[in-house]
Amino acid sequence: MADLVVTKADVRPLPGAIIRGGYLGEAASVGDVVAPKADGLYWKSNGGAVPVLPGIGVITAVGTEGAVDGIAGNRVSVQLYGPIAGFTVAAATKGWASGTAGKIADAAPATPQLLGVGLADNVFLLFPNMA
């Protein structure tokens, strides 16, 4: 199992994406998979943690224009659904919540959560499975 490569400067929502704003609860970067906790802040998901924090979206923007890394308290845009650019992924490759916090893996970990599938031209179709 390997994590998908993310080119932070290339991560961007494509037409059809659904985006929500919020604030970080910890340091995170553009391209990281996140989920809100009870405090309402976004934290990196972790498919290998106990308990698992299921991912609901991917950070597409953080803080000020052009920033790619954020710290706790920074404002973020989180893509909840739809096509997203910036991931090195082959068409039809499934993406899973990784055991590495905030990452997408190309194979299911012990506690699997499907996040989406690769399309052509390094585009990832995000549709988090919350089941």
Image (spheres, rainbow, N blue to C red):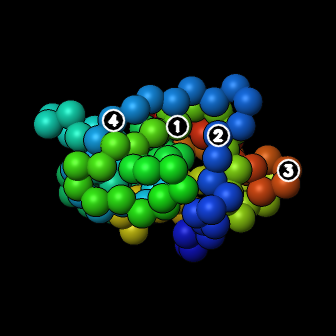
**Image location of residue 100, percent across then percent down:** 39, 68
**Image location of residue 105, percent across then percent down:** 55, 63
Residue hosting label 2: 13
Residue hosting label 3: 120
Numbered circle sitting on residue 22: 4
Q: Amino acid at mark 3?
A: Ala
Asked if one can make out residue 108 in the rendered structure from this viewpoint, the answer is no
Numbered circle sitting on residue 100: none
Q: CA distance from mark 2 to mark 3?
A: 15 Å
Picture layout, residue 13 above or below residue 52: above
Q: CA distance from mark 4 to mark 3?
A: 30 Å
Element carrying mark 2: strand
Residue drawn at x 58%, y 63% is 8
Q: Are marks 1 and 2 in contact (CB under 8 Å)?
A: yes
Residue hosting label 1: 79
Q: Nearer the viewer, mark 4 or mark 1?
A: 4
How many labels were placed on the picture? 4
Asked if one can make out residue 80 in the rendered structure from this viewpoint, the answer is yes
**Image location of residue 89, percent across then percent down:** 73, 61
